[in-house]
Amino acid sequence: MSSNPSLRDLYNPASSAWAFVPPPPPMQNASAPAPAIPAMTSYQWTARPAHNSIFDLSPSLDLSEPSSLNVPLLLRSLVASALLQYTSTALVMPLEVGKLLLQVQWIPKDVPAPSGQVHEEDDEEEALSDSTNEDESYFADPAASHIKYPAPKPVDDQGYVVRTSVLEDGTRPEYIIPVGSMNGAWDMVKRVAAFRGEGWLSLWKGLLTSCVHDVLFSNVQPLVDSLMHSVFLSSASGLYRPPLLLPVASHVITGFLLSPLDLVRTRLISQSAMQRHRTYTGPFDALTQIIAQEGGIKSLYFHPQLFIPTILDNGLRPLLHILMPTLIAPRLGFGPHVAADTSPVAWAFAQVLGSVASLLITLPIETVRRRLQVQTRGTEKALRTCVETRPVPYNGVVDAMWHIVTEERSDLPIKRRSRARRRHVEGAEEKDVDDLSVEKQDGSRWLRNTGIGQLYRGLRMRLGVSVIVFLLTTLGGQQEVDGGWAEL
């Protein structure tokens, strides 16, 4: 007898819920004694705590468990972080010193070539020419000779020679670097290192103050930004676009709080390194003297020549950093929606163009701020800087920018004509005419008649940094690599 195989009777519906209790034993005959059912034990599942990766100071995040602080590991981490920040600041400090000295340097456009200026090469040429023309001068008629003697130099009431030009080496103070010979930050770095009153160590003036300022700014600004988001924005608002005002305001507040450190850093870099001409011995001494002699803490923060440039510099920089890429990216031809996650290369290129456009606005403000920081106020004597500064102080941001454009020149380096060449030119009438035509052509150049170039000292260095950041971003992916280069 054959039976039709079927699996219908063997079907057992699955339980609707998971059971962590063992099933009961199968039913047996009633005559057999039922075995004792052991007491069911319930199992409680516990979630394994996540690993704490914050310095590996605590192996567990369970607050009920006693946690011990690994003090040696924390100290090692802090020391390593401080050394890394100090080293990275020291690497870029020479370029920062060169850029700042170029920004505070005053180069008037109406600087006449001094008639009494003597160079070593001219002395050698005159010695040779005098030895060859001794016989001719001996038989010459004294009455017929046209000898031009240098005009007497003006003196003050005490008999000291008055300085009439910044190009005069005879009346130039010993602690001031000769003006007009540096065309870029790297040229200033080499000139500071070779100058007798400065040297190589002067390229790291203000290093400690710069390091402390950068560390505090990088830690205080995110704290202020998160605090402002928690106060002015509600967490229950759902998906929203963060407003533009809050990150800009956090930068302004942080820059305002740390403005005394920036002032001290500018003073330390600008002052002479010579012992008898140095005003401040360190950052604490500089801060103490500024508070005691320039109006106290209120003037340190709220003086118009310090407060207004601080707000403009710390406000325009983050505002343009956020706005410029968003305005330039849609116009690059890559589509209307260009972002860092969808088109990283196009976005990086837009950031480079945005940073270049931002420098055209922020660099003049930064230059004016540096010049106003160098000026002393109150009863403090004028700072003896290692570069030429304007003898008459500026009255404010607009006054400083106006006088820089109208009073200074931008054609650096200034070419000085030697005295021997001037004598040979005066001896021949044709050469004299040619020289006058050359001077007229030079005078018609707009770089000599305007100081716009003085507002953009350090622009080429900033452009180079932007290109390096673009290459690192393109080759390294979407990670932010400009954190350590932003202050250049």
Image (cartoon, grey):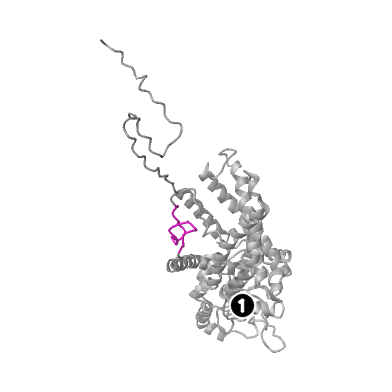
Q: Nearer the viewer, residue 105 or 326?
A: 326
Question: Which segment did they paint magenta?
Answer: 49-67
How many numbered marks does the figure carry?
A: 1
Residue reaching furthest front? Answer: 31
Q: At 67% from the left edge and 55% from the top edge, which residue is drawn?
A: 231
**Where is residue 152 drawn, in percent x and y?**
67, 84
Q: Quadrant of the N terminus?
A: top left
Q: Nearer the viewer, residue 473 or 357?
A: 473
Q: Is residue 395 left or right of residue 205?
A: right
Dominant secondary structure of the residues highlighted in magenta in the image:
loop
Is-magenta flag for residue 239? Answer: no
Q: Quadrant of the C terminus?
A: bottom right
Using a 10 Å C-alpha cutoff, classify the residue at mark 1 as few (fewer than 14 neighbours), some (14 to 19) or many (20 or more): some
**Where is residue 249 drawn, in percent x and y?**
66, 57
Q: Is residue 96 left or right of residue 241?
A: left
Three-letter code, disc 1: Ala
Residue under pointer 1: 286
Q: At 50% from the left edge and 83% from the top edge, which residue is drawn?
A: 131
Can the viewer see residue 88 in this picture? yes
Can the viewer see residue 423 in this picture? no
Q: At 51% from the left edge and 72% from the top edge, which residue is drawn?
A: 204
**Where is residue 32 drawn, in percent x and y?**
31, 32
Asked where in the image residue 434 lies, by quadrant, the reply is bottom right
Asked if 182 appears above or below 155 in the picture, the reply is above
